[in-house]
Image (cartoon, rainbow, N blue to C red):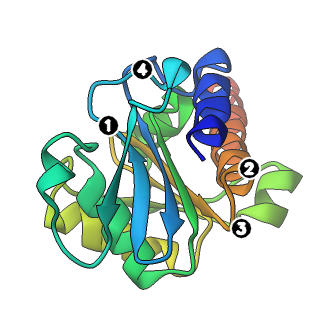
Amino acid sequence: MWREMAKFGKKLVDHGLVESHFGNISVRTGSKMLITRSGFALDEINENSVVEVDIDKPSSLDMIASSESLVHRMIYKNTSALAIIHAHCPFAIIESLLAEGDIIVPIDSEGQYFLHEIPIVKGGIGTPELAKNTADALRDHKGAIVSGHGTFAIGKMLEEAYVNTTQIEHSCKLKYYCDLVKK
């Protein structure tokens, strides 16, 4: 499974959706999740870059797992997600900071069709508040943007979570440029 995580980690970096050492990826495996370790480059994932931790309870391995493990756990507990990608997509972050409300409505047809709307959530990195807010938003959406921080996208497999990540960024990029021209 780490090879699949490596494939999408590399794609995230290659397409500018994250800087190498930021963001994280997880996959649910029954009552556990395989998640990238804190501080490891997403474009260099190997068998030592991931750790398996329990979903239902804290683990001694949490110290080396991603700082967003708590958020991933809460998403798995409260949604049907089997894969999660957390990326620091630049246009999604910009739009989250410029938004006047707590939702971004895509203006492009694909974004409208696939995403409908993109919730913006708040909370500190790796906090219970962020975990709850993100999981709540992802019950009814394929992705959400943490204000000023980045996206969380879910799927039944990593490819779907990746596509949802790219769609959020694409919709936010188009919205940003269109809004810029209107000013």
Q: What secondary structure is marked by label 3?
A: loop
Q: What secondary structure is marked by label 4?
A: loop
Query: Which one is in front in this view, the residue at disc 3 or the one at disc 4?
Result: 4
Residue at position x 68%, y 68% from top? 156
Q: Which mark is residue 37?
A: 1
Q: Is residue 119 above or below residue 183?
A: below
> How far apart, in angstroms, are the residues tagged by discs 3 and 4?
32 Å
> How far apart, in angstroms, are the residues tagged by discs 4 and 1?
9 Å
Q: Earlier in the sequence, mark 2 or mark 1?
A: 1
Amino acid type shown at disc 1: Arg
> In the picture provided, is 76 more to the left or to the right than 125?
right
Q: Is residue 70 above or below residue 179?
A: below
Residue hosting label 2: 159
Near mark 3 (Cα within 10 A), the count class, few <14, some 14-19 or many ≥20, is some
Query: Which one is in front in this view, the residue at disc 1 or the one at disc 3?
Result: 1
Q: Earlier in the sequence, mark 1 or mark 3?
A: 1
Query: Looking at this view, is 107 or 53 the one in front?
Result: 53
Q: Is residue 154 above or below residue 91?
A: below
Amino acid type shown at disc 3: His
> In the picture provided, is 112 more to the left or to the right than 49?
right
> How far apart, in angstroms, are the residues tagged by discs 4 and 2?
19 Å
Q: What secondary structure is marked by label 1?
A: loop
